[in-house]
Image (cartoon, rainbow, N blue to C red):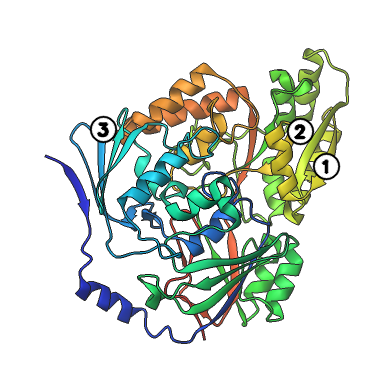
């Protein structure tokens, strides 16, 4: 007997839903400010949250998640697992087309999943258990896994679930991100680096009636104050990443609305363990941790709006390992550890910092905290795209604050960063014990067992310190008060269906 998840999508229901979204005939343009210039608009190579922000507006996914991280239908209207947990069957919606007119079908899904498994893909680790993909019929996909996979559905509701046109994959290959084509409500028009990305509505999209905006323009504005000023002046309709210290002021502005989000995320300092220098010594890494006051960073840099943390999940998460609470700042212990490592004070450390004002603020606080704790910290502040290039090359000593900002499963905030083959393991951390634990989390279909494995992995990360976890964000969006129907995926990405501006 198969375990099956299915959802009604009758013509009558679709009609009711379309009516419930009201009249979206107040066609307009949406102007949405991002804090960073997105990296590749291609899920195979995308690493940054901002790239997926754009792709989520453009593209459907095979599945979605809601605020409780429940898996919901998307391009896959239903799915079922075999009894042994090694075969997943997807039933696809019918009649959809890619934005270039190519029909959406099972073969397209197969091509995309296989592409995401290719060597060098940022998604290869996400779907490492996928052994084969078969297009059984135009609307049915069979995915075989090498072992039961606890996280596969979550991955199909994330980047892996975005399906690009096979025609464009063939034409552009790994340059697809320059002009992506998917199944979704908005198609790509142009991109001007460090300035804007423009999308326009795809009138042939199968659910086009639910989308009010004719055009979406993403403006790239790294400075928090400038983003907010543009919104206040009416030059923007929506912005991400409000500086929490401005939240009280914005809340008093009747022309604006603050929209808080609760999502799985963390922010860290990544320590390059593959580079000769003091950070290769675990005593020095512990000393750096003893130099930092996480709660002070949260209180001063973020007006107490975020949550201090020392693990890949926040202290109020059921997955948090309570045996390892946040350590208090102890400058004297930091100095003693430096001495035990046989080093002289001050120990030099360069931190690569993205040029966002809030990130720089955190960097400056870490710099000050290190001064009387045996460290001489310097900051290398560069644009975000450059930090990605330098860290890919291994040309850095430490990097932060940085981390997965939106996730729909613990696997996303743990495996890529801590597994030796992880796509975001930029510390170059290698631990057979950690690899074994994280691999086990992917096959543990019993929730209690999976939780225990994650707690063990968290304890090991606390001990080895390839990254230092600092805090957990509670992202704040701000919109004009005229904007109605704001909503997002369970992993925190804005969706535009049902959204309007009066």
User: Could you tell me which secondary element the residue under label 1 belongs to?
Assistant: strand
Pick the residue in front: 75 or 188. 188
Q: Quadrant of residue 226?
A: bottom right
Mark closer to the chain start, 1 or 3: 3
Residue 163 in view of the camera = no
The quadrant the N terminus occupies is top left
Residue 343 screen position, x and y as percent:
84, 16
State yes or no: discs 1 and 2 in contact (Cβ < 8 Å). yes
State yes or no: discs 1 and 3 in contact (Cβ < 8 Å). no
- Counting other residues with Cα less than 10 Å from the Cα at mark 2, is it few (<14), some (14-19), or many (20 or more)? many
User: Could you tell me which secondary element the residue under label 2 belongs to?
Assistant: loop
User: Could you tell me which secondary element the residue under label 3 belongs to?
Assistant: loop
Residue at the disc numbered 2: 396
Residue at the disc numbered 3: 86
- Counting other residues with Cα less than 10 Å from the Cα at mark 1, is it few (<14), some (14-19), or many (20 or more)? some
Cα distance in 3D space between marks 1 and 2: 10 Å
Residue 412 screen position, x and y as percent:
49, 40
Residue 470 screen position, x and y as percent:
65, 40
Is 317 left, or right, of 13 in this rendering?
Answer: right
Mark closer to the chain start, 3 or 2: 3
Q: Residue at x 71, y 59 (%)?
A: 193
Q: Quadrant of residue 309?
A: top right
Cα distance in 3D space between marks 1 and 3: 47 Å
Residue at the disc numbered 1: 380
Q: Residue at x 30, y 31 (%)?
A: 148
Pick the residue in front: 288 or 175. 175
| Foreground: disc 3 or disc 2 | 3
Residue 171 in view of the camera = yes
| Foreground: disc 1 or disc 3 | 3
């Amino acid at each position: 007997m198969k375990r099956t998840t299915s959802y009604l999508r009758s013509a009558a229901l679709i009609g009711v839903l379309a009516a419930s979204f009201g009249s979206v005939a107040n066609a307009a343009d949406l102007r949405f400010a991002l804090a960073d210039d997105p990296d590749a608009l291609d899920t195979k190579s995308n690493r940054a949250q901002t790239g997926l922000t754009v792709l989520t507006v453009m593209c459907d996914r095979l599945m979605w998640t809601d605020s409780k991280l429940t898996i919901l239908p998307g391009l896959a209207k239903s799915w079922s697992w075999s009894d042994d947990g090694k075969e997943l069957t997807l039933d696809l919606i019918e009649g959809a087309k890619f934005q270039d007119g190519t029909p959406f079908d099972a073969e397209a899904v197969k091509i995309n999943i296989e592409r995401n498994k290719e060597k060098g893909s940022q998604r290869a680790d996400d779907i490492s258990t996928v052994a084969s993909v078969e297009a059984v019929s135009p609307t049915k996909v069979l995915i075989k896994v090498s072992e039961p996979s606890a996280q596969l559905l979550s991955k199909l509701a994330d980047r892996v679930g975005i399906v690009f046109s096979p025609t464009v994959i063939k034409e552009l290959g790994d340059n697809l991100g320059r002009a992506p084509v998917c199944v979704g409500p908005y198609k790509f028009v142009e991109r001007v680096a460090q300035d804007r990305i423009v999308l326009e509505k795809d009138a042939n999209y199968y659910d086009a009636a639910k989308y009010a905006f004719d055009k979406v323009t993403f403006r790239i504005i790294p400075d928090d104050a400038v983003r907010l000023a543009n919104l206040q002046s009416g030059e923007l309709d929506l912005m991400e990443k409000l500086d929490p210290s401005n939240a009280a002021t914005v809340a008093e502005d009747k022309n604006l609305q603050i929209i808080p989000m609760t999502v799985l995320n963390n922010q860290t300092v990544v320590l390059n363990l593959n580079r000769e220098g003091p950070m290769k010594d675990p005593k020095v890494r512990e000393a750096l941790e003893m130099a930092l006051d996480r709660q002070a960073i949260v209180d001063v840099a973020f007006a107490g709006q975020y949550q201090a943390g020392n693990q890949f999940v926040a202290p109020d998460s059921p997955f948090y390992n309570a045996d390892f609470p946040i350590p208090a700042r102890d400058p004297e212990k930091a100095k003693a550890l430096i001495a035990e490592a046989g080093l002289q004070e001050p120990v030099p450390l360069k931190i690569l910092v993205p040029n966002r004002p809030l990130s720089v603020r955190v960097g400056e606080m870490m710099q000050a905290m290190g001064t009387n704790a045996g460290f001489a910290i310097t900051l290398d502040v560069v644009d975000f795209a450059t930090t990605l290039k330098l860290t890919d090359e291994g040309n850095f000593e430490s990097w932060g604050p940085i981390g997965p900002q939106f996730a729909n499963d613990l696997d996303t905030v743990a495996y890529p960063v801590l597994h030796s083959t992880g796509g975001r393991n930029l510390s170059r951390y290698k631990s057979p014990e950690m690899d074994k634990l994280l691999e086990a989390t992917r096959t543990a279909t019993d929730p209690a067992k999976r939780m225990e494995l994650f707690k063990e992995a968290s304890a090991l990360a606390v001990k080895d310190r390839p990254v230092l976890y600092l805090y957990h964000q509670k992202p704040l969006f701000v919109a004009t008060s005229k904007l109605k129907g704001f909503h997002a995926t369970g992993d925190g990405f804005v969706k535009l269906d049902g959204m309007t501006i009066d």
